[in-house]
Amino acid sequence: MIRYLSLYREFLIQRFKILMEYRVNFIIGSTSTIFVQAAGLLTIWVVMRQIPSLNGWSFDEVLMIYGLVTLAKSINHMFADNLWTIGWYYVRSGGFDRFLVRPIDPLFHLLADRFCHDGIGNFLVGAALVVKSSVSLGLVWTPLKVLYLVSAVLSGGAIFMALNLITATSAFWLMESIPVTQVIFNTHEFAKYPLSIYHKGISLILTWLIPYGFASFYPASYLLGRDVGAMAWLGPVVAAMLLAISYRVWLVGLRHYSGTGS
Amino acid sequence: MMRRLRRTLAIYGSVASMTPKTFLAYSIWVWVEFFLQIMAMIIFVYFWRAVYAGGGALNGLSLRQTLNYILLAQIILPLAQTRAVFRFGFIIREGQLIIELLRPLDFQAAEYADSIARLGLYLLLKLPLVVIAWLFFGLQLPANPAVWGAFAVALVLGHAVLFFFDWAYACLAFYTTETWGLSVVREGVAAFFSGALVPLAFMPGWLQGVANALPFAQGLYVPISILSGIAPLSDVPRLWLVQIIWLVSMLAASRLIFRVAVRTVTVQGG
Amino acid sequence: MAAIEVENLSKVFRISKKDPGLGGAVKALFGPRYEDKAAVNGISFAVNAGEMVGYIGVNGAGKSTTIKMLTGILLPTSGQARVLGRDPHRQRVANAREVGVVFGQRSQLWWDLALIESLDLVGKIYEVEPARYRQLLHQFSEMLELGELLRVPIRNMSLGQKMRAELAATLIHEPKVVYLDEPTIGLDLIVKERIREFIKQQNRERQTTVILTTHDLGDIEELCRRVIIIDAGKLIYDGPISTIKERFGKYREITFETGGRSGAVDLPPGAEPVGADSAARKLTLRFDRTVTTASRVAASVMDQIEVLDFSLAEPDLSSIIKQIYSGALREQIAEEMPA
Ligand SMILES: Nc1ncnc2c1ncn2[C@@H]1O[C@H](COP(=O)(O)OP(=O)(O)O)[C@@H](O)[C@H]1O
Ligand SMILES: [Mg+2]
């Protein structure tokens, strides 16, 4: 474990050297997602300044939901973006073999191989939203709540990663996993708004099947003092279970790869 | 003279006819986009229903009108996305620029032929989406053929405005070599100011001012507000005129900027 | 002690067959049809520690597939491989620590990183002790002339530079076993020479076991005393190079420099023309040593045309291998190979 952490640090240092070499690209890349988030946020603002609430949620409360899911997404974006490229960049070209001839875990190697700076913008936006929301609403941050926030963001990030890992594994069969990943990944768009605005079926799916609700709606509800019962505390459990499942799926994919090659 | 024109058209026609073939080769992407768009529609339908939960009209638009507008806007939104940035990035990375420029046809015209073919093909491919929106989300389409005609003209004009704008914008790729970030910025700005997420009427005055100063609304808001009935037919000639002014200035700007960018790159020996 | 032991090793790929066109795609969706392809078919051999073995065969013979099984990337369909006493797939990580592999057409280095940074990272991944790392880096830099290249990103390197970099990265953890899959492909002679020297030296100093795949027989002749030849997944020869030369150098070539036009020549039995170049006034014949002799062929030709000079070519490995590849000697090898 310690070995992997220090290895990750090495990978990270090297990665930043590359990024600094292309400084303009670094700045454009890491700030570009801010524009996309701004588009979504401006929409909410433009609409909500004309209505008292969205299904009982004020503008600032919606920002908390939006901010949490954006933070969770940014964790995945920064640390696990290579799951998107596994198909065309590694499996199809045979480059994946290189992970298998090294004495470290191939999944670790894959993830460590490219820290993605493009997620930084999302992180900044998410953090800003949480701050803005809690300042406007006058939330009191007790140590417990801070801890809760950190764990919610990490769990949310883990949920994003686990779902992407499951879908990325399809690359071992299809050579290209982006289509599958894209479809599942995009369902997180639902989680930018209170789940209560949707049909019951949709919110059930986003809770139990593709549990992005635990990356946004449920922890936001808790932080805002809304009662969602046990759902407020299930996030880390769901995330851990999903991670375990996704790792099993990944192992099946690896086994398939060692049977068929690229 | 006529013969020359016919020959020229035939050349660009054959360029355009290649488009559907390459497009269908990526049929999985067509499906993915299809799913994503349905998903986006579902989200918007619930979002706007919740917005209108108090009843009545907002900014003079009823729930019905807003949904109608938003559904149509979501269907054609991918059209407002840029391809030029990736195209230029690819051409530069692969060192193909010279090859493209040496072909015996105007590079921009050939790309435009490709783009207009995409537009046609795209509309065809999106028909099922329209049917789904009509069946499940209550999309209403105008019965008056004049509205359809006005929409079609506005769409082609608006598409051209965006095409030439993107041409100029994509020239940035000549300098940065970064394409992903450029396209993300472009898409974020366009998504909002084209009116794909929210009708311009909802925006406060200053935002509407910004939207009107940018070309994106010409490609999406204008045609869709005609089709969804937000803009009355009597307003159409004025809208067209504005589009044409945009078109001419974007065309001129794109050619100028491209020339400057190519000179810079080729001087550097790219 | 054997460093590598391979017993009855096979790898069968299941390839899905599709008819062309949309109809084929639909059919494949409902009733996929498969075809089994044995890329490696029942191969057995053992390589001793410190040995350098040439592993050759035409494209598609199954060389890379064998190497992938020996590195643990691929799981054998049947049979087994042991590397340093381990199952390379099941004990993949332990195996990876002690072996190194170069896949000639792919880089294991980071495209955008300067070579030195790539090497540092590889050193960390393999946990090379820092002092040892510095020592090896110094040594490799000299042997492979990497000095100025250390600061250059891989993306800016020429093919030859890339391969030198690749070798350094592959050997920096002092693997006991090294697989080189076409390491000299597309390189010029000088680089080839340097790479061969380097491999030879590594083998000498550390008793590194080397399996070398190449199409360049110069590599083999210079580095390996033993070759294994495979064809269509089957092992068709395993033995010293010298034996191939002696036993299978059945054909020899004799070249005549003719005085006038060479015209038509009645060939002695057992000889056949390889090339006639009347402008250069040269006639080259190939004859079967078991049927006739050089002097008989020479005499027969000299009887018919004016010959200024003639030369006899030593059987060289490449022409023998060419014959083996083309299948001409397959039966003979099958007969003569000890079962
Ligand atoms: N992953 C794979 N799936 C299916 N067939 C493969 C795969 N890898 C190799 N093959 C086939 O197996 C045969 C042997 O390939 P390979 O070991 O790469 O040959 P070599 O390295 O000797 O040129 C070839 O016919 C090749 O097409
Ligand atoms: Mg090979």
Image (cartoon, coloured by chain):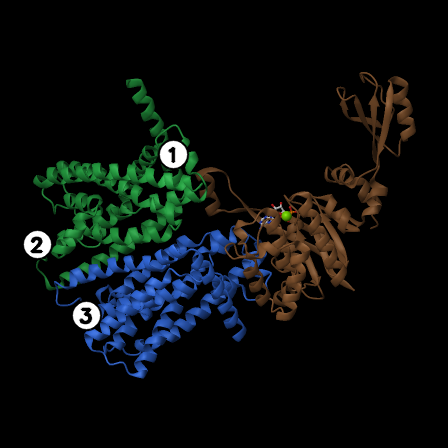
Chain colours: A blue, B green, C brown
Q: Is residue C1 above or below residue A222?
A: above
Q: Can you identify the residue that label 2 sits on? A: B60
Q: Residue at x 33, y 63 (%)?
A: A122
Q: Which mark, residue B18?
A: 1
Mark 2 and mark 3 in contact? Answer it, CB < 8 Å. Answer: no
Q: What amino acid is found at the position of numbered circle 2 in the picture?
A: Gly
Q: Residue at x 30, y 80 (%)?
A: A145
Q: Is residue C177 above or below residue C312?
A: below
Say what secondary structure mark 1 lies in.
helix
Q: Can you identify the residue that label 3 sits on? A: A57
- Same chain assignment for discs 2 and 1: yes
Query: Can you see residue C147?
Result: yes
Around disc 2, counting alpha carbons within 10 Å, would you say few (fewer than 14), some (14 to 19), or many (20 or more)?
Answer: few
Q: Earlier in the sequence, mark 2 or mark 1?
A: 1
In-image side of B68 versus A242 (left or right) = left
Q: Position of residue A112 (x, y in %)?
A: 48, 64
- The quarter of the picture where residue B235 lies is top left
Q: Is residue C147 above or below residue B127?
A: below
Task: Name the chain under label 3.
Answer: A
Q: Residue at x 34, y 74 (%)?
A: A152
Along the viewing direction, whichever of C216 and B50 lies nearer the viewer = C216
